[in-house]
């Protein structure tokens, strides 16, 4: 992959807006590039950023992998030195909510928005823009959520050198479906039976929960022995600073006014699935939280795998019962469906997963990640 392309001088200096053919050419390049096999979700994001940089006038960006089921942020990367810090951005996401929150975009009809368009071309009315973004000389912030009927796969923030227009948002909206499909398919590659299975539990790491205590700055105050081992399996800064996923969940636990659960499931660096729950301790004013990390239950792992393989919500329900060994009549009674409807779903499950009833449960066995 090449590095993130910088906008051409003409875009930066005189702010000449892209023409329809510029958008069309960029869209064709992106759709062709993301269709190439073997790309990771990060590759897909970088491809989008590279091919859209001149059109959007990109100056920097950051993106976050998400738990497809809950939409919780689980990992983050950036390019070009994005404005602000993780701590600042989480404040505007949860403590002092601002426009275009990821949680709102995830449920909105349109998955793309910019501060300029959301504020009627008055970006300074946004505290996030006024206090964190504008001081860096950045003109606007565009956000996009890569989600489909199977889950939410990635969130993206693009900082630009000019204010975004409705044409810019339409361009991004038009390329999102292809990029989102490619991300889901990239996730599916690592969960199919063709991927190498890994040990379900290491000799010194059983199924029991492990616990960490974090202070208000998300520094690790204390942790049990198993938690220390598991921390090495999560992407993050290391040392006494909590991994990004725990900072994301801690912010939600402390400040989310909607009261959403501060829970996420994610794949660790060795391919195993873990579930992480963060909750505020009794001394809530101190900002201290407890983070519980444990291997995800097989049915939860199976749900994540089936989402990546493109199974609908109803097909996932049928597949989960099939994996338990339930016969068709029992599944029909449980889901209040006719046996013929269940049979149709069963056929779809086998077609999409490529496995038989006997092997369906094996999809929940952790698979090694490439590289």
Image (tube, rainbow, N blue to C red):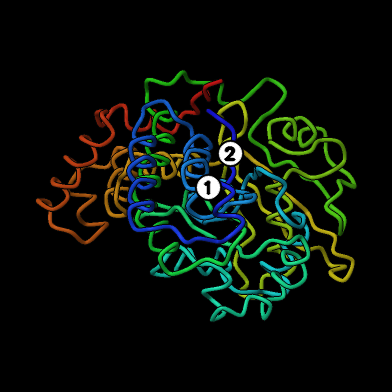
**Label 1 Cα crowd, 10 Å radius (few <14 / some 14-19 / many 20+):** many
Quarter in which the C terminus is drawn: top right
Q: Residue at x 18, y 45 (%)?
A: 328
The earlier-in-sequence mark between 2 and 1 is: 2
Is residue 132 shown above or below 65?
below
Q: Position of residue 160 (x, y in %)?
A: 60, 58
Q: Residue at x 65, y 45 (%)?
A: 76
Q: Is residue 117 left or right of residue 237?
A: left
Is residue 147 shown above or below 107?
above
Q: Is residue 134 left or right of residue 222?
A: left
Pick the front one: 310 or 15: 15
Q: Position of residue 64 (x, y in %)?
A: 59, 48
Look at the numbered disc 2 and give the secondary structure of its residue. Answer: loop
Q: Residue at x 47, y 68 (%)?
A: 165
**Label 2 Cα crowd, 10 Å radius (few <14 / some 14-19 / many 20+):** many
Look at the numbered disc 1 and give the secondary structure of its residue. Answer: helix
User: Total marks drawn?
Assistant: 2
Q: Position of residue 307 (x, y in %)?
A: 38, 45
Name the outermost residue toward the left: 340
| Label 2, label 1: how far apart the Cα atoms are | 8 Å
Q: Residue at x 53, y 49 (%)?
A: 67
- Label annotation for residue 266: none
Q: Is residue 53 left or right of residue 82?
A: left
Q: Position of residue 349 (x, y in %)?
A: 24, 40
Place residue 101 in its image quadrant.
Answer: bottom right
Place residue 139 in its image quadrant.
Answer: bottom right
- Label annotation for residue 4: 2
Q: Are marks 2 and 1 in contact (CB under 8 Å)?
A: yes
Residue holding disc 1: 53
Q: Is residue 283 left or right of residue 313?
A: right
């Amino acid at each position: 992959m090449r590095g993130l392309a910088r906008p051409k001088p003409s875009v930066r200096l005189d702010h000449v807006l892209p023409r329809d053919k510029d958008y069309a050419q960029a869209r064709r390049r992106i759709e062709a590039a993301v269709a190439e096999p073997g790309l990771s979700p990060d590759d897909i994001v970088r491809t989008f950023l590279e091919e859209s940089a001149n059109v959007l006038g990109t100056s920097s960006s950051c993106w976050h992998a998400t738990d497809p089921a809950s939409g919780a942020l689980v990992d983050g990367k950036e390019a070009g030195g994005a404005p602000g810090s993780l701590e600042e951005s989480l404040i505007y996401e949860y403590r002092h909510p601002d426009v275009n929150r990821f949680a709102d975009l995830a449920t909105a009809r349109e998955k793309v928005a910019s501060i300029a368009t959301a504020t009627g071309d008055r970006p300074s009315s946004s505290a996030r823009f006024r206090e964190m973004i504008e001081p860096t000389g950045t003109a606007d912030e565009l956000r996009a959520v890569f989600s489909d009927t199977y889950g939410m796969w990635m969130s993206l923030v693009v900082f630009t050198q000019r204010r975004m227009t409705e044409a810019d948002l339409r361009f991004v909206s038009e390329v999102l479906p292809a990029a989102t499909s490619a991300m889901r398919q990239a996730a599916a590659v690592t969960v199919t039976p063709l991927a190498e299975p890994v040990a379900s539990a290491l000799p010194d790491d059983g199924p029991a929960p492990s616990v960490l205590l974090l202070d208000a700055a998300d520094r690790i105050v204390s942790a049990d022995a198993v938690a220390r081992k598991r921390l090495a399996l999560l992407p993050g800064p290391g040392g006494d600073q909590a991994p990004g996923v725990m900072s994301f969940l801690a912010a939600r636990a402390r400040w989310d006014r909607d009261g959403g659960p501060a829970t996420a499931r994610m794949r660790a660096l060795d391919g195993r699935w873990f579930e992480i729950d963060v909750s505020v301790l009794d001394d809530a004013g101190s900002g201290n939280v407890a983070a519980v990390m444990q291997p995800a239950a097989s049915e939860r792992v199976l749900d994540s795998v089936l989402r990546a393989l493109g199974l609908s919500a109803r097909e996932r329900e049928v597949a989960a019962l099939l994996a338990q060994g339930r016969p068709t009549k029992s599944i029909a009674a449980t889901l209040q469906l006719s046996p013929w409807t269940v049979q149709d779903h069963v056929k779809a499950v086998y077609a999409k997963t490529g496995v038989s009833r006997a092997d369906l449960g094996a999809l929940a066995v952790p698979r090694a990640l490439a590289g």
